Image (tube, helix red, strand yellow):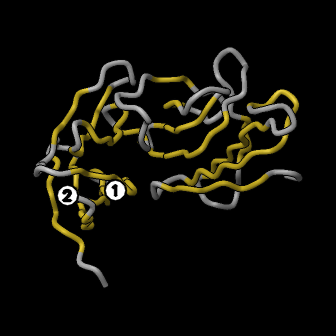
Amino acid sequence: DPGVRFNGARTDGSRVVAWGEKDAEDGVGAPGSRAISIVWISDDGLAWSRHEARLPNGDPFRLATVSVSREGFAGLGSSGGPMQMASSIDVGEWTLVDAPVQPPGLVFPSAGGLVTVGVVAGAPVVFVSRDGSDWRAIHGPAQPGQYRIGDVARTADGLVIVGAFGAQGNWDGLLWRWGMSGELADVGRLAPA
């Protein structure tokens, strides 16, 4: 696909999703730097289907990241304003959903709907929603101090969350695990190598 800049790829073990962007006059962004997201999906890594990411009204949606599961696709992107959460069944049409925290964190499709992670009142929180309109917060163990979330990965039965905990500028790595049964557990501190 000439002129497409590759941005990322993810898999859930059964499908692969890759995304990038290309310059387009009807794309998202400032004049002279407008782009539209191109998304490819594959069941085997050999045969791919190509889609342009658009909102239901036909406007382009510029994806920053995409997650995949058997249930569908979820992502973060923009239609010209601030970063927004969205979900899709086919990666061509994206439906915006209300994020439970700002700025929104990585969002993942799941059997029960959508899952995302954020920091509320200085502590890590997992949010679950059937459709992105109402979110239920699952609070994890928290100590006095500040938490930062570095990255989130989806596993077969939950999420693994890597972050940091600090007080007065002294940061230590932490690892949390969230199981689909609903608990957010502090797995422990990450020791420096």
- In the image, residue 86 above or below residue 150: above
Structural distance between the alpha carbons of marks 1 and 2: 30 Å
Task: Decide which of tag 1 and tag 2 comes sooner along the chain.
Answer: 1
- In the image, residue 77 above or below residue 154: above
How far across and down, in percent of the image, does residue 9 sit? Answer: 59, 56
123 and 66: which is toward the camera: 123
The answer to whether residue 147 is seen in the rendering is yes
Q: Which residue is at a point 43% across and 44% down the rendered structure image?
A: 106
How far across and down, in percent of the image, does residue 179 sit? Answer: 21, 49
Image quadrant for the C terminus?
Answer: bottom left
55 and 122: which is toward the camera: 122
- Residue type highlighted by circle 2: Ala
Residue at image mark 2: 167
Check disc 2 and report its element: helix, strand or loop: strand
For residue 155, which numbered disc appears in the image?
A: 1
- Residue type highlighted by circle 1: Thr
Give the mark toward the camera: 1 or 2: 2
176 and 33: which is toward the camera: 33
Q: Which residue is at a point 15% across and 45% down the rendered structure image?
A: 140
How far across and down, in percent of the image, does residue 126 sit? Answer: 26, 40
**Residue 80, image quadrant:** top right
Q: Which residue is at a point 56% across and 29% down the rendered structure image?
A: 82
